[in-house]
Amino acid sequence: MNDLHQMAHDARLAAWTLAASDIDTRNAALLAMADELEARQADIFAVNKADLAKAEQDHLAAPLLGRLKFAEEKLAAVTAGLRALAGLPDPIGQTTLSRELTEGLKMYRITCPIGVIGVIFESRPDALVQIASLALKSGNAVLLKGGREAINTNRALCDALRAAAEKVGLPADFAQLLETREDVAAMLKEDTLIDLIIPRGSNEFVRYIMDNSRIPVLGHADGVCHVYVDKAADLDMAVSIAVDSKTQNVAVCNAMETLLVHRDVAAAYLPKLLPALQAKNVKVLGDETVQSIIPVLPATEEDWHAEYLDYTLSIKVVDSLDEAIAHINRYGSHHTDAIVTADEAAAQAFLTRVDSAGVYHNVSTRFADGFVYGFGAEVGIATGKIHARGPMGLEGLTTYKYKLLGSGQLMAEMKNGTRQYTHVLLNEDCPL
Amino acid sequence: MNDLHQMAHDARLAAWTLAASDIDTRNAALLAMADELEARQADIFAVNKADLAKAEQDHLAAPLLGRLKFAEEKLAAVTAGLRALAGLPDPIGQTTLSRELTEGLKMYRITCPIGVIGVIFESRPDALVQIASLALKSGNAVLLKGGREAINTNRALCDALRAAAEKVGLPADFAQLLETREDVAAMLKEDTLIDLIIPRGSNEFVRYIMDNSRIPVLGHADGVCHVYVDKAADLDMAVSIAVDSKTQNVAVCNAMETLLVHRDVAAAYLPKLLPALQAKNVKVLGDETVQSIIPVLPATEEDWHAEYLDYTLSIKVVDSLDEAIAHINRYGSHHTDAIVTADEAAAQAFLTRVDSAGVYHNVSTRFADGFVYGFGAEVGIATGKIHARGPMGLEGLTTYKYKLLGSGQLMAEMKNGTRQYTHVLLNEDCPL
């Protein structure tokens, strides 16, 4: 059986080695991972077939089976991702602030890995490769808990990644697999060995994690995203953005759940929108004003909170930009919200005052994604405000330390006036 | 009585107003605060005298009485601090990343306030002014809970700051005072209205907060700081740095608690060090090797964990740089640790591999401070690794949002190949 405490301890040791490793070695590990997965593909596909057969026996829904499947197409995607990741710049060891504090004493703020990160993710085996590779590139060790349906596939993938790391001289224990809920419960107690927990999953699950651990948690709760159609909107653009935000993929956290429409354009806009939504089989709910313009079902207070993740949309008519902003800040989940308008002042007010990780002008909410943002991939999307916000790529997996390089400076000298603070910004890299 | 939920709600509304306020107004508020404190000084000093008289009756220790006192000298320091803070650049609204995602669609990462922050601090009334002013400059609202000994002084100071904010048109509720432990317990439950808790206080207190709230907590636990005297150290420098790190102020978290000495220089160094420590009345404890060189009391396993905050020092002889690093990472509190050496390779290894917020070469640990680092002041020193590390100034009180400015881009177009990702870095400010 896994001894979680020992695993966390091994991860900590691996993390210290990774933190001191050079970027060439870490990039070589990423390339070796791609090669190793290709070399082992027959075995990996075979165990994935076994996982799939078991899941079918257990009557798993078709979309879940699709996510569980790991064959040629997914392998090609993850190996391409690994090779692209090897080409990105080193996220650690970067100097982000440099300053002379007093004569002969320089301060440098240097990015460094967080350390040991626990990630709990759904039944997508390709997520394991993405998470582990982002962690290694940024010098972190990870404890990984995937969905139980994917257990054999995850074991095969994790073994391949560990073997690749060892081949280039990095510790295999940078990635370790947890297999049971008891492992997760035990992991949450290791607050001296684990620095961060990233849970991907339902709202209730994230709350369970937060309630049961002292370890900092970066997770995303709901994705209740809005599009607001302003009175100065291009109505054709507003139709296409609403349709894309709602229907391009309904099962994801950056899909729109509620549409807000300014009263001045509601009568012109809603009759244009309805057939476009009906063509995609969207069930539309609306407040009383919406119902007076187009034939839809009534929306209730609960609908403004709802994350449907389905072909359902609630629509509300608002009297002003202010009302739209207030509605979003009250009912939204601070994920991603968009305004459609030709009025730059309205756009600026919306972008400044909506309290969300993503605030968009004239673009679909579906763009909230680590790959789309140019981060290579993402470990998750953070809807909290601490540390990282929105898609978490390499930078979200780093912290920093302050390096001070002196020549014997004493606080007693500063206090008695022998030395003075200079506080000159340097804009130079740390030599050590 | 305070209704904590209502207070948190009012703070949230104030935070939204502050987030959209311009920097000139926020700076005017800081200058108005300095003026207001000066105008009300007679009243403030009078209520502080009442707090002091009560504390003396209650037999508060002399150092605590010194911290509680708020008279001319402290007023001059806080008003100078407020006026200096008004001169610092705006920490919010800064573009930290800009990228074209696809033709006509630009992404900007913009710094913004965290929102509502709860800060629990000790019986230093000047801390209230520092914390509230850093919060206002960075566009945040704060709920403040100070030591109960300072209650009348804190009320007078908080009233002055609130009045000053109102004079320039900002909401008074950017700063609100909590007065009881029940208020603190109630605050910890408001996880939908409060974004961050910063507890300053004992280790056990910080753990109590973490165990009783879902709100992210940034606190500092112990300050178990080390100085390591390498075999290539300048021994005279190593004596003065050790004495400064230990004795310049023993009661603070950045004071040294354990000294590590390389075996090769122990016989030469320790007899130089001992009289310098004895001149400052430091009680010295040592391992067996230390005891064989200088006449000191034995150190036990508990001493390696101890935060004395007093004139006591434990000394250990190590066989190597590696052993020193391992000791610090095992027993230290990841606060601030220094190496004294003339060997740059040893310094580099120490600075890279010691897992602390501050890693110093040839300088006293006492330099770990927000003012010293040039941050103006600090809300606290974070010993965790998430969000902020080390002294937290203005930057530690900000987060960011992604603004996307488009012209109708749809995810359906990206998926069907009508549009391609360009991912060109722009290096420009966000126009909205």
Image: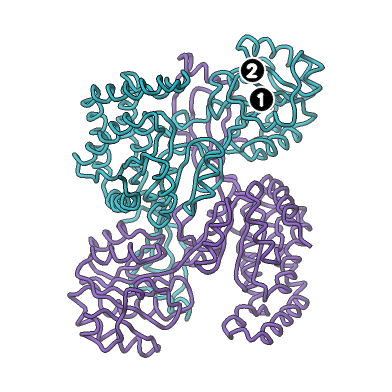
Chain colours: A purple, B cyan
Type of the residue with mark 2:
Met
* Point 65% across, 11% down: residue: B278
Q: Is residue B16 above or below residue B397?
A: below
Residue placed under numbered mark 2 in the picture = B237
Which is nearer the eye, A331 or A278? Answer: A331
Relative to A245, say whether B294 is above or below.
above
Instruction: State the image coordinates of residue A254 (x, y, percent, origin top left).
Output: 44, 71
Q: Disc 2 on helix, strand or loop?
A: helix
Name the amino acid type tagged 1: Val
Residue at 50 percent of width and 44 percent of height = B218
Say which label, 1 or 2, has the lower sequence index: 2
Task: Kindly identify the residue that appears in the image at 29 percent across and 32 percent down.
Answer: B157
Q: Chain of mark 2?
A: B
Cα gap from disc 1 to disc 2, whole angstroms: 8 Å
Name the quadrant containing residue B234. Answer: top right
List the residue tagged with mark 1. Answer: B340
Q: Is residue B167 left or right of residue B374?
A: left
Please give left or right for residue A79 compared with residue A291 in the image: right
Front-most of residues B222 and A168: B222
Quadrant (top left/top right/bottom left/bottom right) for the N terminus of chain A: bottom right
